[in-house]
Image (cartoon, grey):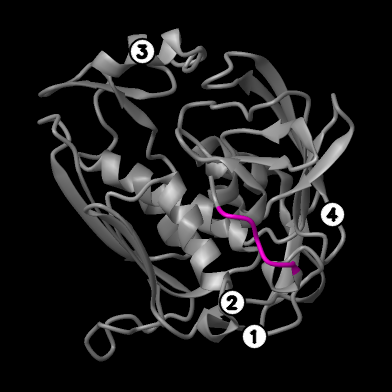
């Protein structure tokens, strides 16, 4: 097992929430070993652990909250969670003075930049992991998300790294997106090169209905790709031709980080989203025969929790 890590120093930024449109200040603060990732709503003076069974909403983004305090929520955490997970940050306090993380440029790259600028240090103790022992799958029509044991279903030597392997396919009616697929092994280097800069996206004809519903108030071409049939509206175009599936895979990394420790296994998904990703973690931890810990997990881990509530 490797050592646990936190940040060397605190670092902050200011931005605007994608859905709320509100200006928010975020600060990443080093934390002691075994704390895990904890969000601190400084305006409400409450702390919310980043855990899969505290997901309160997953329709357009991942929202965590305290069950006994409906106002105590933090939305759009998936990009930061992906950056923390991929950069191997185990323990950190995320201070935020509003209900939603800043969207920044719509990707995880600004968060990775903050983490690397603050520096990464060992903070004591061994880093646990969660090894998938049996295949677990959740479905919704043609969409599915699955976790398998490491290497299962692959040719000999196809995936030799110990960690999380990822395969995802998406299919959108807009011709500018269509069907895309991507497979990779997750490492700090592959995340930086292949996923971190992939931006969130939306369809042009959905924007008006989102805003009528009180959402996407902070959205713009500066923080989201906007697609209209065959066209990408953003004047700078795409960062990759398949930026759409790369961003969806980035979301998977962020959502699976709510397991509470790094996963050892293989993720396979088709048309999955935040809700299915969260349902998958609930399904995995519903049966102790599905997984095992390679070390002593910290107090906030799912293995030490009572039976989790059904996902939203």
Q: In this view, does 125 lie to the left or right of 207?
A: right
What residue is disc 3 on? 209
Q: How crowded is mark 1: few (under 14 residues within 10 Å), some or many (20 or more)?
A: some
Q: Are marks 4 and 1 in contact (CB under 8 Å)?
A: no
Q: Marks 4 and 1, Cα distance to the nearest angstrom?
A: 22 Å
Queried whether the magenta region covers residue 306, the answer comes back as yes
Residue under the point 46% across and 13% down: 213
Q: Marks 2 and 3, Cα distance to the nearest angstrom?
A: 40 Å
Front label number (2 vs 4): 2
What residue is disc 4 on? 31
Q: In which quarter of the image is residue 207?
A: top left
The disc at residue 162 is none
Look at the image and give the residue range highlighted in magenta: 305-310
How many numbered discs? 4
Front label number (4 vs 1): 1
Element assignment for label 1: loop
Front label number (2 vs 3): 3
Q: In this view, does 124 lie to the left or right of 188?
A: right
Q: Do the residues labelled 2 and 1 touch (CB within 8 Å)?
A: yes
Look at the picture and state if 119 lies above or below 27: below
Residue 185 in the image, given as x and y percentages of width and height: 38, 68
Q: Marks 2 and 4, Cα distance to the nearest angstrom?
A: 22 Å
Queried whether the magenta region covers residue 90, the answer comes back as no
Element assignment for label 3: helix
Q: Marks 4 and 3, Cα distance to the nearest angstrom?
A: 41 Å
Residue under the point 37% across and 84% down: 160
Q: How crowded is mark 4: few (under 14 residues within 10 Å), some or many (20 or more)?
A: many
């Amino acid at each position: 097992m490797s050592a646990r890590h936190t940040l060397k120093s605190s670092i902050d930024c200011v931005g605007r929430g994608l859905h709320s449109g509100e200006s928010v200040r975020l600060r990443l603060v080093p934390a002691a070993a075994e704390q895990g990732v904890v969000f601190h709503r400084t305006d409400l003076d409450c702390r919310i652990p980043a855990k899969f069974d505290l997901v309160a909403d997953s329709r357009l983004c991942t929202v965590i909250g305290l069950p006994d305090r409906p106002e105590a929520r933090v939305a759009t955490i998936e990009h930061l969670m992906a950056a923390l997970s991929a950069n191997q940050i185990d323990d950190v306090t995320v201070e935020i003075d509003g209900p939603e993380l800043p969207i920044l440029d719509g990707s995880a790259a600004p968060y990775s930049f903050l983490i690397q600028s603050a520096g990464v240090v060992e903070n004591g103790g061994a880093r646990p992991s969660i090894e998938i022992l049996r295949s677990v799958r959740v479905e919704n029509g043609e969409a599915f998300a699955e976790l398998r044991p490491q290497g299962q279903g692959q040719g000999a030597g196809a995936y030799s790294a110990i960690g999380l392997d990822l395969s995802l396919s998406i299919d959108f009616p807009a011709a500018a997106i269509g069907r895309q697929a991507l497979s990779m092994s997750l490492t700090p280097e592959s995340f930086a090169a292949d996923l971190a800069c992939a931006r969130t996206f939306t369809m042009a004809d959905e924007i008006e209905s989102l805003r009528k519903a009180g959402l996407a108030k902070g959205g713009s071409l500066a923080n989201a790709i906007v697609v209209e049939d065959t066209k990408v509206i953003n004047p700078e175009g795409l960062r990759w031709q398949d930026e759409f599936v790369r961003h969806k895979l980035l979301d998977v990394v962020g959502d699976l980080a709510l397991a509470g420790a790094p996963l050892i296994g293989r993720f396979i998904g088709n048309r999955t989203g935040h809700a299915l990703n969260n349902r998958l973690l609930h399904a995995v931890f519903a049966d102790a025969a599905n997984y095992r810990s390679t070390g002593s997990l910290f107090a906030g881990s799912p293995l030490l929790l009572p039976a989790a509530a059904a996902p939203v």
